[in-house]
Amino acid sequence: MQTIANGPGNWAYVIGPYREPVATVQPGETFAVETADAFENRIDSPDADITKLIVMPFVNPLAGPIYVDGAEKGDTLAVTIHSIDVTRDYGVSALIPEFGGLCGTVFTRTLNPPLPPRVMLHPISDGEVTFSEQLDIPTIPYEPFYGTIGTAPELEAVSSLSPGFHGGNMDAADVAPGNTVHLPVNVPGAMLHVGDGHAAQGDAEVCGVATEIPTRGVFTVDLIKGRPIATPRVESDDFIMTIGSARPMEDAARIAFYELVMWLEADYGIERLMAYQLCSQVARVRLANMVDILYSVVAKFPRRYLPRVAA
Amino acid sequence: MQTIANGPGNWAYVIGPYREPVATVQPGETFAVETADAFENRIDSPDADITKLIVMPFVNPLAGPIYVDGAEKGDTLAVTIHSIDVTRDYGVSALIPEFGGLCGTVFTRTLNPPLPPRVMLHPISDGEVTFSEQLDIPTIPYEPFYGTIGTAPELEAVSSLSPGFHGGNMDAADVAPGNTVHLPVNVPGAMLHVGDGHAAQGDAEVCGVATEIPTRGVFTVDLIKGRPIATPRVESDDFIMTIGSARPMEDAARIAFYELVMWLEADYGIERLMAYQLCSQVARVRLANMVDILYSVVAKFPRRYLPRVAA
Amino acid sequence: MQTIANGPGNWAYVIGPYREPVATVQPGETFAVETADAFENRIDSPDADITKLIVMPFVNPLAGPIYVDGAEKGDTLAVTIHSIDVTRDYGVSALIPEFGGLCGTVFTRTLNPPLPPRVMLHPISDGEVTFSEQLDIPTIPYEPFYGTIGTAPELEAVSSLSPGFHGGNMDAADVAPGNTVHLPVNVPGAMLHVGDGHAAQGDAEVCGVATEIPTRGVFTVDLIKGRPIATPRVESDDFIMTIGSARPMEDAARIAFYELVMWLEADYGIERLMAYQLCSQVARVRLANMVDILYSVVAKFPRRYLPRVAA
Amino acid sequence: MQTIANGPGNWAYVIGPYREPVATVQPGETFAVETADAFENRIDSPDADITKLIVMPFVNPLAGPIYVDGAEKGDTLAVTIHSIDVTRDYGVSALIPEFGGLCGTVFTRTLNPPLPPRVMLHPISDGEVTFSEQLDIPTIPYEPFYGTIGTAPELEAVSSLSPGFHGGNMDAADVAPGNTVHLPVNVPGAMLHVGDGHAAQGDAEVCGVATEIPTRGVFTVDLIKGRPIATPRVESDDFIMTIGSARPMEDAARIAFYELVMWLEADYGIERLMAYQLCSQVARVRLANMVDILYSVVAKFPRRYLPRVAA
């Protein structure tokens, strides 16, 4: 099994078509990828000065681009995640001034004094994350996923901090082992990027940072030829899911639900307005992030309510 | 046990301080309330013309106001819901032109042609809801809750279609049997209103309508004297929850999470920025509605991560 | 000429159908109204403690309701403003913590420390407003208008701080002498409310407060029978205007432009999509407020581009 | 005087650091640039099928990148526009399905049927634009500006359809002859792009399209060394201006006003909260666009209220 590693100093900070691929994989191939944490693995102490460590736009380093042989514009790339192993014995979270869900930011610009910076290290062992050794709360289960996964747009190079129609920094906990993520192919080779491993994350990632970890992940990629999708999709044992990323947040939800309704019509034979009315009774939603350059919302349709025989 | 019934023609269509109470209850008292469905129980056929049936602002009829003896401005009203029984053998859902999450509305005004109206009846029996007898999908469990519950603002009378700091039309499935809803008291007697029973609802209530039912609900009310809250809270066995209602949707999420963080600090001794950082790892979110006059978001903190001994 | 005065202690703090009228006027009648400033004329020193003076929800006191004889649901009330005289020799502006366009608020909830309170008095004389005697800047012309003007909704009582389809706290400088404001009639007598005089205001009213003044205004009201409008309109010598109030701000703009397009079609014979395309070339926009409970946007069509002969 | 021309087939469709410059200019140099209209000059008839002509992402072609000798990260590029001549005898506007301010879009996703496409040609002569030869309305003055002007971000390549901190597709009519536009320099040479000439445009550009023209513009560029700016600024005889681009629209307004306040403090000695309070009395706002990938708002401070002697 091929192991893909960008190596220090060679990370991607945008998802776009302009960098040379670091590796090539074949449809059907299973391979491993090594990723750094969102801070380039540079934090090893709660005393780290996060305001000095972050030098924009060089944050959220990604592995890739990975060239998928045979991928062409108009295809869909199906990425199955088999496992995500943490490659360090702790995760990192932080408060970053002017970044987060409950503070003024570069977009929601305010004159208020900023919140202070803060760094926490979270020990990880035996499948458990310790939030704090000071605060007497139970450990959090290790439930890893990739905050960022995406394919290159045709012309744009998008910050690794932003999600969008190409995937990217969605911070959706459904991008997890056992699930398959569908991404649009806009350029030859698809140019897959992945990173931003999380050992744990709350819905919304409200302070802006999850339990950030370096990882070794194992993936299989496949191509669905000539069937484009408009926005990322995820399949799990229990749900079919679509992800919308936009601001304001209602537009993220609109994109996700629109695509879910269209999927139910196209692949499961439920006429679109019927699907719309059905979603209103049984759909589930994950608010993936309320902190990134765009907000991400996952619309989830439970497989158990799919028609037993497609119409 | 007292049964409170507004009776036909006497429903409340705003939540405010201007109507005479229909009943008085004592703190600690358990009582029943009868509610009509959101369409005043006037739909008994899929051929009903929803565009004629809806005569604004006379939709979403509420039971109440219920006067809670001893309630004063600055108190919090704790409403425990014991049971919600459907009082008809079907629920109703509908598509209403210019209302819903995936269409132009009176706020998100567009020049596009509107979607067509549509009415569906959903048989309910043995704890199961049948979405459609035409579409071959499994039945949906009967999981009832009240879409609308609230107390009077001090001066405003708020449409029964709107949620807000007073509660109201939040469409949050956590307002369910077994849970306790905390609401602000702004006027003598609190003036509790309740209605909009749902037999089933997806997160976001995306088409604008759930499985709407008339109900008989059993409640106990209690007063928490002199401890005001800023926005509704819900307690369940598994979560403590706060509900924010606003537009755009990110402001609803900000309100909910801000109040959750402040609650964790005030009652559980977790300093607010630590609570903020902790929520970013373990919180859950329900997108309650993306269709009402304000959107509602429920921020949920799992009880299992509360400190074992409060600081 | 009748002078209408609510008098101290008798102001309206909501616009709704539940208060007795303070006066009755006839269609075609010219009358005067006395208004207090947004702080009930209680600030007479820059040392005033604004955080103590403001006791929610008792801010932005309005004169009215004024009963317009013969007004019925479905009519439009046309209010012509002839003059607005300031009845004090200074205006007041202020910074109010957790209120304003560039700070965390009760809706855009943040954990940042709040901005400090601050009060300024602005001398007014000879048609000039002095912003500050410390800061060496030219005087500002006295260009008065009413920040708040509205008619009662059918069932709701809306905070005097909120704009909406009923008018209210739009903070639109086009509600000025020489112009005619059209408001919907939802209840018998229309129940007109007016207040929140401003001697000067920037577009957006960015800090949340204009140069607030008590006034004596002279008005004529007329009724347009049986021609309802969906949102306030204003006519001046140079523009026909519609005002949308909503959050997010783009929805306020959508409402305003939708109604402007519909008006151009209905009254000036420009087919709606042609009117839409024409507005895209010649319309003007005023951002009236970015601080109130809803934001207000004025879409303005220059009369000079109206068809010379209606189609 | 150097004339810079990309030539057919060589337009830029993103603003980024990845393309070779088409020309180099010196600080202080005056030069001409030729631009195509937003549709690559391909529309010459109202019968053109706009839905076929638009092949995403190849719309809004830009001239450039232009390398400014000596420009380095941390500088500001000052671009003075001397003149904009239209190089064709007509402009083009259009309705584009799923694009515009009053319809469902790829972001504000709706299930409603789309609006129809439509193309109009607008004759231009003698400084006048004829909107329609069918509709009897006066001609519109030729008031040209560039809808799109920007410099390369450090790593991102941004669609020519999007505005942002780098400038881009702001559609702000203040980017006009006589004015100077300040743009951030993020990469060596600044990499200036310009295009999207408009002969006329309403505030908000509500249908999504202005009177689109090919142009020949004359510019002078200068460098302000070592003085970075956060978002574009414009100086005219009457105003100093800042432009914010974001969604929702209130965030665009927040960015613009925040930067205006900071500018008043840094360069004119008005303490920031005083400047905030002063803007609330005298600022003007242009809603530049409500249709692009981000909305753009121009906050304008009238020079006449600048302190006569800086503090």
Image (spheres, coloured by chain):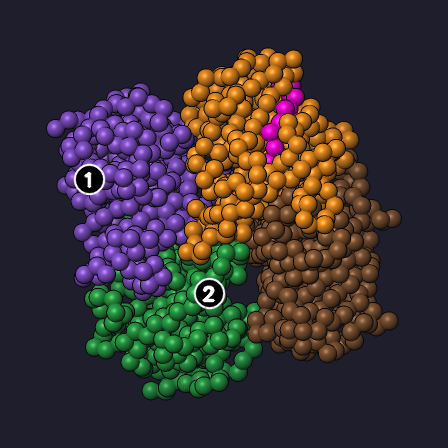
Chain colours: A brown, B orange, C purple, D green
The relative height of residue A144 versus residue B288 in the rendered view (above or below) is below
Q: Describe residue B28's horizontal placement relative to residue C120 as left or right.
A: right
| Residue A217 percent location from the top left of the image | 80, 62
The residue labelled by disc 1 is: C81
Q: Describe residue C174's horizontal placement relative to residue C164 as left or right.
A: left
Say what amino acid the circle numbered 1 marks.
Ile
Q: Does the magenta stretch include residue B211?
A: yes
Label 1–label 2 contact, CB within 8 A = no
The residue at the point 42 percent across, 21 percent down is B18
| Residue A246 percent location from the top left of the image | 56, 56
Disc 2, SS:
loop
Q: Which chain carries label 2?
A: D
The relative height of residue D276 versus residue A5 in the rendered view (above or below) is above
Q: Describe residue B279's horizontal placement relative to residue D248 as left or right.
A: right
For the question of whether residue A138 can be seen, the reply is: yes
What type of secondary structure mainly makes up the magenta span?
Answer: strand
Q: From mark 1 to mark 2, how far is it between C-alphas?
A: 42 Å
The residue at the point 80 percent across, 67 percent down is A220
The residue labelled by disc 2 is: D97
* Nearer to the camera, C39 or A43: C39
The relative height of residue B15 versus residue D149 in the rendered view (above or below) is above
For residue C4, which quarter of the picture? Answer: top left
Stretch in magenta: B210-222
> How many numbered tags mark residues here?
2
Structural crowding at the residue carrying mark 1, measured as other residues with C-alpha within 10 Å and reported as few (<14), some (14–19) or many (≥20): many
Say what amino acid the circle numbered 2 marks.
Pro
Farthest residue, direction left: C1
| Marks 1 and 2 belong to one chain | no
| Residue A112 percent location from the top left of the image | 49, 44
Disc 1, SS:
strand
